[in-house]
Amino acid sequence: MLQDLENNFSELERKILALQKNYRNLTEKLSELSSEHDELKIRYDEERRRNQVLAEEQKNIKLYSAISGNPEHNRLMKNHINRLVKEIDFCIAQLQNSGL
């Protein structure tokens, strides 16, 4: 009977040690994954900003191309001018409403 209890205790102790080892390994892995996640998040933000800059540059290139008379971008130029005219009209309307 006492031998059985000692065996059970030894088995429990071995299992507890294995669980502690697994827990330490998992916490280390979590720490590694957290830092990797943070690095990837930073890289994602940088790439997103770079993408926005490139998209703006592409838009400007198309606009410059349209201004220089490239027939492929005439519609783009017309749309841009229309948008600017609408914005100016809106500003004029606001000025008139404010009494200036």
Image (spheres, grey):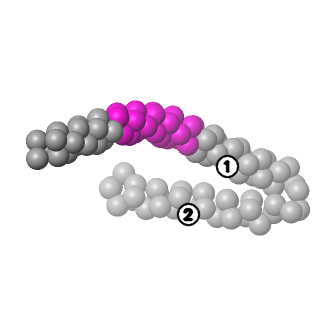
Above or below 84: residue 4: above
Tag 2, which secondary structure?
helix
The magenta stretch spans residue 34: yes
Residue visible at 56% across and 37% down in the picture? 43
Q: Which residue is mark 2?
A: 86
Let me know if residue 63 appears in the view.
yes
Q: Position of residue 39 (x, y in %)?
A: 51, 34
Which mark identifies residue 14? none
Q: Identify which residue, 83 or 3, lies in the foreground.
A: 3
Q: Residues within 10 Å of mark 1 (few under 14, many from 20)?
A: few
Indicate left or right for 40 with 13 as reference: right
What is the quadrant of residue 16 in the picture?
Answer: top left
Q: Which residue is mark 1?
A: 55
Q: Position of residue 76 (x, y in %)?
A: 74, 62
Q: Looking at this view, name the residue that lies furthest to the left.
A: 2
Amino acid type shown at disc 2: Lys
Q: Identify which residue, 4 or 62, lies in the foreground.
A: 4
Indicate left or right for 24 with 60 as reference: left
Rounded to the nearest whole Å, what is the CA distance between mark 2 and mark 1? 24 Å
- Please report whichever mark, 2 or 1, sits nearer to the chain's N-terminal start: 1
Indicate left or right for 42 with 12 as reference: right
Q: Position of residue 31 (x, y in %)?
A: 40, 34
Q: Position of residue 58 (x, y in %)?
A: 73, 49
